[in-house]
Amino acid sequence: MTAGAVAAAPVTSPLDVERIREDFPILRETVNGRPIVYLDNAASTQKPRQVIDAIVRHYERDNANVHRGIHELSNRATDAYDAARQRVAALLGITDTAELVWTRGATEALNLVAYAWGMNRLRPGDEILLSVLEHHSNLVPWQLVAQRTGARLRFLEIDDQGRLELSMLDDLLTERTKIVSLTHVSNALGTVNPIREIAAKAKAAGALMVVDGAQSAPHLPVDVPSLGADFYAFSGHKMCGPTGIGGLWGRRDVLEAMAPFHGGGDMIEWVELESSTYAPIPAKFEAGTPNVAGAVGLAAAADYLGGLGRDAILAHERALVAYAVQRLREIPDLQLLGPRDLSERSGVVSFTLADIHPHDLATILDNEGVAIRAGHHCTQPLMKCLGVGSTARASFYLYNTSAEVDALVDALHRARGLFGY
Ligand code: 7TS
């Protein structure tokens, strides 16, 4: 199988995947002499030619620092940078572009809220409500805040399918709850959390609602403001964009009331030796020379995803996951984790196979050109809840095919054989 030649699909997809694959140069690579089967999209996605070209074009034609130079290149770079914010905002349904703050990614976005809001506002006795599903980047920043402020961490638990125990919400949400910060989609299990419902309850309890959208922005047709949250964090590299760029959407009034996160150039209005006044949002949170080429590249990714259609991308992934689950169930001793109802999950399939260590599985699969992730997926507390040290995880995106699912399943059968099962 080559990038262009995809086997007849036993899945019905609204996407012309064969054509889409031609946009992704890396899919023509081989690994160990075989065509690459890239199933590690929850970690990072590949980039289409359109994104790569936009970045090259920026450096070849428009590169300069932004918002400072009184010269043509700086004006061009500034225009491209400002337009990029609008294009990414449009993909996510954000109409007030000042509410979109560039960050290095979801991790920095979550830290921004934890430090600029949490560290300044929380007091001993206040509570931060998280869940056991969280990626470490929506856990460790809050641990740091709790240690420093005396606030207490509380946790929503999960059922045996990795779904949040929503019945705990009524007891956990009290007047002490100041922040609820939850992932929209679990990176380890693919669980899609009913974030609108939870946000409504959190807001009714008077808490600030933070959504970790690292795994929803790439895969779901998210209209961010309508989730009913106060903050939404995402990473560009998980949605066909470059690394080192992502964003934080925040409600205007909340962002305006917050102290800055980093201090430096571009985030100020006026500086004296002893004090400063700050620029309006979003600049207030964007100190220093920004990742201009990253923003331009992410805007090209947003255009690309918007062009394919967010609903079509979701439908494609759902069809692939349904096919993958059906095929993986054929493998004896393979245990699938996560929600059984596929409408409750995104394009992630996590599993264990007999007592073969997931790292060994991933290594054997890599020999066959199949890239999956194995490990704790930066969710060590979740692994503990599930009673496993680690899992193997295949995660799909818009360019994956049913033939690649077949390649995964065939490789797993061979791995099983190698271990004498
Ligand atoms: N939140 C979730 C739900 C994630 O899946 C990740 C990255 C992050 C936050 C952090 O994103 P970053 O871009 O700032 O690093 N998840 C993964 C993963 O599943 N495998 O590698 C990175």
Image (cartoon, grey):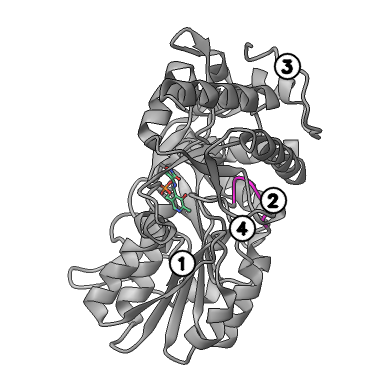
Residue receiving disc 2: 342
Residues at badges 4 and 2 in contact (C-beta under 8 Å)? no
Amino acid under disc 1? Pro
Q: CA distance from mark 4 to mark 2?
A: 10 Å
What span is colored magenta in the figure? Answer: 217-222
Residue 138 percent across, percent down from the top left = 40, 61
Q: Quadrant of the N terminus?
A: top right
Cβ of mark 3 under 8 A from ligand 1: no
Does residue 26 appear left or right of residue 406 in this picture?
Answer: left
Q: Which residue occupies 77% across, 41% down?
A: 312
Residue 187 percent across, percent down from the top left = 50, 50
Does residue 223 appear left or right of residue 49 in this picture?
Answer: right
Q: CA distance from mark 1 to mark 4?
A: 34 Å
Label 4, secondary structure: give it: loop
Q: CA distance from mark 4 to mark 3?
A: 30 Å
Residue 66 percent across, percent down from the top left = 43, 43
Residue 218 included in the magenta stretch of the image: yes
In this view, which residue lies farthest toward the left?
A: 273
Which one is in front in this view, the residue at disc 2 or the one at disc 1?
Answer: 2
Residue receiving disc 1: 280
- The disc, 4 or 2, on the residue closer to the chain's N-terminal end is 4
Q: CA distance from mark 3 to mark 1?
A: 53 Å
